[in-house]
Every structure is written in C-alpha cells, then in structure tokens.
Image (tube, coloured by chain):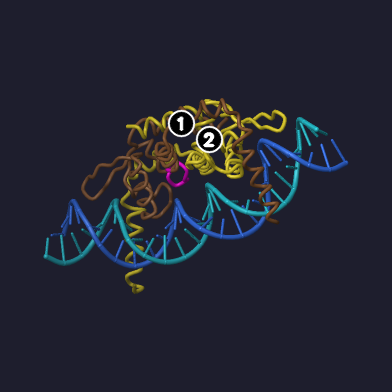
Chain colours: A brown, B yellow, C blue, D cyan
Amino acid sequence: MTEQERIEQEVRECVCEFMHVHEEIVDKVEKVMPDEQQLLELSEFFKVFGDSTRIKILYVLSQSEMCVCDIATLLQMGQSAISHQLRVLKQMRLVKFRRDGKTVFYSLSDDHIQTILAQGMEHISE
Amino acid sequence: MTEQERIEQEVRECVCEFMHVHEEIVDKVEKVMPDEQQLLELSEFFKVFGDSTRIKILYVLSQSEMCVCDIATLLQMGQSAISHQLRVLKQMRLVKFRRDGKTVFYSLSDDHIQTILAQGMEHISE
DNA sequence: AATTCATATGAACATTTATTCATATGTTTA
DNA sequence: TAAACATATGAATAAATGTTCATATGAATT
C-alpha cells in the first residue's frame, strides 16, 4: 500500500465515521447513553451467563440449593473447576451461600437470575 | 507426589464426587435437566451479551434503529469492529436489519432482548 | 462503465478465560 | 490434637475471542 493510498483510505474512513452519519439519531442517542462504566459492568454481569459450565450451575441451583459436591456430580466435573466457577458467580452476586459444618450450600441470589434464564430459554426455543 | 499419595488423592476425590453427595437432591435435579445441547445454546446466547462493545451496540439499538456508521460514531470505534460484532449479534438473532440503498439499518430483533437488558440493569444497580 | 461509498470479511495478533494440578484453609470427628 | 473431609485458591497451560489491517462485495451516482 503506497502512502498515497493510505491517505485516501484515511479520508474514506473519515468520511464514513464523521460525515455521513445520521446526525439527529446520533445526537439523540448520545444524550441518553449510560456512562461507560455502567455499560462495562453490565457486560461483565452477562459474561457470567456466557459459559456453559456456569449456565449449568445456575440451572441446577434454580432447582434446589446444593453443595459443591452435588454440583460436581451432576455436571460430571471436578470439584476444583466448580469451585472456581462458583467464585465467579459469587463475585457477581448471582449466587449466595450458607455454611453448614464442612458443607457449603449455594443458591441463586435473587429473582433477576431466574427471569433472565427464562427469557434466554424462550429466545432460543423460538 | 508418590504413587501412594496419588492413589490416596483419587480415593479422596472419588469419595467427594460419588459418595458424600446429597443423593435425593442430585437424583431429583438430574431428572429435570435440559439436555446438554440446549444448555450449551443458552450459554452461547448469553455470551453475546458478555462483551462491552456488543452491549453498547444493543443499548444504542434499543433507542433507535441505526446504520453501521452511526454506531461506529457513537461508540468511537472503527467500522470494521462494529461490523464484525453485528455479525455475531445477527447470527444469534439479537438484531435484524433492513437495507436502504447503500445503507444497512440495524435494530433489535425482539422484546426478550429489551427485557434481558432491563433485568441486567436492575441487577447491577442494586 | 467507472467511481464512490457503506458495509462485510479473512487473516493475524494480542488478550482473556476455563480447566487441571497441587496445595491451602477451615471445620468436624476420633 | 491429629486425621479426615469439604471447599478454596494459585499457577500453568490450552483454547477462545476481539480488534486491526487490508481487501472484497454490492449498491448508487456520474
């Protein structure tokens, strides 16, 4: 690519990104955009649902509270893997837990989680 | 780690994973588990929400239909990056589009998407 | 028909992420 | 208090993912 061509491309990109936009729409939406930080947090929240192991954990917990061993058995996975994922779920407050002797029982932390799971199920079964 | 110790660990893991589980719970939940494939699809669906660029795209589209250039301008990102992400959103049927001459307008594909976004917002603002 | 423009896409690179292995922590029981 | 047990965690490795760069496609305009 020659320098000349590079400049031409930059001009083209500039045109695309700063001149031929629909200004009314962009201006209107810009005003109601939540701040960067909030949208980042939102994506981090959903990221937690975006792994099949964690989805399975959430699903089984939607049926009953359960200890780490139970979950590992149900999913046929190692205890360590489950434990690591439970930590992620805990950090995002998707699950809560109570200790009973040596055992720790996990459960879903609130109703949003169920609602989100249900909406997702509906979407993929359409 | 000696062979002896390895065996001991395997036994320990075996105990954890196959003997001290709460059988009633495990049996009950095993019966209502959706099949592997469905849960995998569910996680793939949510994975799409789990990236800040895509969340921003979904958010701006929840306000108005919009062309690729508009989105790139709003998010201050390159056209290519947006286009790649729109493909992901399209594949999972989170967005639909209509062509008008050279321009392609994107919009959210159905109400589940709005509901899920709203539930997520509620969760993180608690 | 040739050019311009909006969008799409393939390849490459850098970053993130999930699992495993080994071990640590904290609770109970002998 | 020592051993057994359920769970947690740090480090390492392997796999997945997002962005950029260069270019391709397809529609409109001259």
Q: Amino acid at mark 1?
A: Met
Secondary structure under tag 2 reads: helix
Q: Which mark is residue B74?
A: 2
Do the residues under discs 1 and 2 have CB atoms within 8 angstroms? yes
- The picture places residue B57, in percent across and down from the top left corner, at 53, 35
Q: The C terminus of chain B is located in which quarter?
A: top left
Which mark is on residue A33?
1
In this rendering, the answer to whether B31 lies above or below C21 is above
Q: Residues within 10 Å of mark 1 (few under 14, many from 20)?
A: some
- What percent of the width, then of the height, locates residue A46? 44, 39
Between A67 and B126, which is closer to the camera in this rendering? B126
Pick out the residue farthest to the bottom: B2
Point out residue B78 in the picture as x, y percentages from the top left corner.
58, 44
In the rendered view of the protein, which quadrant contains the N terminus of chain B? bottom left
Is A82 left or right of B76, judged from the image as shown? left
- Residue B74 is inside the magenta segment: no
Identify the secondary structure beneath mark 1. Answer: loop
Label of residue B80 in the image: none
| Amino acid residing under circle 2 | Leu
Chain that bears disc 1: A
Where does the magenta region start and end?
A48-54
- Marks 1 and 2, Cα distance to the nearest angstrom? 9 Å
